[in-house]
Amino acid sequence: MIELFQHALRLHADPSRVVVRPFHLAWSRNGGSRTERIVAAVMSLDAAQTRAELELVLKDFEARHWQTRRVFMTRYDEIEDMLGIDGSEIGDEKRQLIGAYFCHEYSYAAAALMNPSAVPHFDQSGMPAGSQRILMSLRAVGEGHISSVAFREGIITDGNQLKLAPEPPFATATDAVGIDEETLPEGPITVFRHRDSTLSGTVIFPITAAQSKGLEDLRLVHFTHDDGTVEWLGTYTAYNGSVIQSELMRTRDFRAFDLVPMTGPAARNKGMALFPRKVGGQYMMIGRQDGENLFLLKSDTLTHWDEGQKLLTPAFPWELVQIGNCGPPIELDEGWLLLTHGVGAMRKYAIGAVLLDKADPSKVIGRTREPILAAANQDREGYVPNVVYTCGAIRHGDTLFVPYGVADSSVAFAFIPIGSLLEAME
């Protein structure tokens, strides 16, 4: 019997969590634009009218957002660059008002909060023995069912207690430099966390055409390169409303985030998870190429992935419909510990575990016959019922810390003794 200790804390969707985002207006076919018209209209206001209109905007929104006036000024600068106008004679109030017309408020986690992953935090200073600071990514779903990436920071103690850092009252969206207002960008792009924003208050929104309808299910991993340097990498699904593709997030400081499309046949599928280091001189991934089975993928680069070899097929009743990975493999002395998800009757999701050979991960050493987590009782109800799902656990001493989504509606937390988990395998 696998021991499992569930933490009382739950994170839920929250419509009050809002950010200010750029509002883009398309250019009209006759050569003019609504952008130019709106700017001209604001420019025609006298000082009293400008102040009165700006005060109305600030009355509604300044208390709900962080550094609202600065956000409006930054947005004005982008509009000025786009139109090629000389704003040297334009006062701050008029600049702020113009910026406000090209922003909107977005509730990024109103519909759902789910599918977390966890990695060691980049800052472990001041941690007492037996404790570690952690960083979690979460999939937040807002208006239009658009998914974005949110973060939470916290500490796991030596007594397997979780203490989350408080969310700041204001959230901010990452930003990219030099984005064309008229077309969605293509290909790799770098986004930046605001210099004054905490990571727990930062949200990464879709920005390219391929991502336009969502950044889904980030699987973070603390990756160690051959030269000993470390990098935080994360695979996720980019969705444009009709087509999916796998992409790679890369960061060394959680200030700048490279969002890089991956190529190759395997990248046309979702649910890819990277090993935390090279194995046998190659990068390796676990992925699901056929919607049913798990595959081991190998590559000489981080961004191109060809078809792999079949690793696992459904074997037990709780996973007969399909299996997939639940995050990057975790290195143990005994081998690579891989959490999996299975789908059974009535499309009920459950989480299991597999142990792979450390030198040759194509060899399966052990596998749990029964799930270690399954939707039950109150965990069955939500946005998508009968689902438990994680995008990545973290080792904490002799324990596995597992953050997991419940019914695509909330996030729960569990601690599982690794020894108990390995003993349950056959």
Image (spheres, helix red, strand yellow):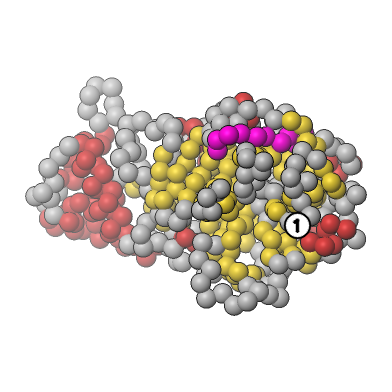
Q: Position of residue 320 (x, y in %)?
A: 85, 37
Residue 81 at x, y = what percent?
Answer: 21, 40
Residue that mark 1 sits on:
333
Q: Secondary structure at mark 1?
A: loop
- The disc labelled 1 sits on which kind of residue? Asp
Name the residue nearer the viewer: 312 or 67.
Answer: 312
Q: Is residue 302 above or below residue 32?
A: below
Q: Is residue 160 left or right of residue 353?
A: left
Between 127 and 380, the residue placed more toward the observer is: 127
- Residue at x 64% of width, y 70% of height: 156
Q: Position of residue 141 (x, y in %)?
A: 56, 48
Number of numbered tags placed on the structure image: 1
Quadrant in the rendering for residue 293: top right
Q: Is residue 152 left or right of residue 36?
A: right
Magenta residue span: 291-302
- What residue is drawn where x is 58% and y is 64%? 134
Task: Work out which quarter of the rendered image holds the N terminus and state it.
Answer: bottom right
Pick the residue in front: 414 or 425. 425
Occupied quadrant, residue 321: top right
Q: Please tell me whether residue 297 belongs to the stretch shown in magenta.
A: yes
Mark 1: few/some/many CA within 10 Å (<14, 14-19, 20+): few
Residue furthest left in the image = 89
Is residue 402 visible to the viewer in this orientation of the structure? Answer: yes
Visible residue check, residue 340: no
Residue found at x 63% / y 28%:
306
Q: Residue at x 45, y 48 (%)?
A: 257
113 in the magenta segment: no
Q: Residue furthest top?
A: 30
Is 396 left or right of 263, judged from the image as shown?
A: right
Residue 381's place in the image compared with 301, above or below, is: below
Please provide percent x and percent y for residue 22.
36, 45
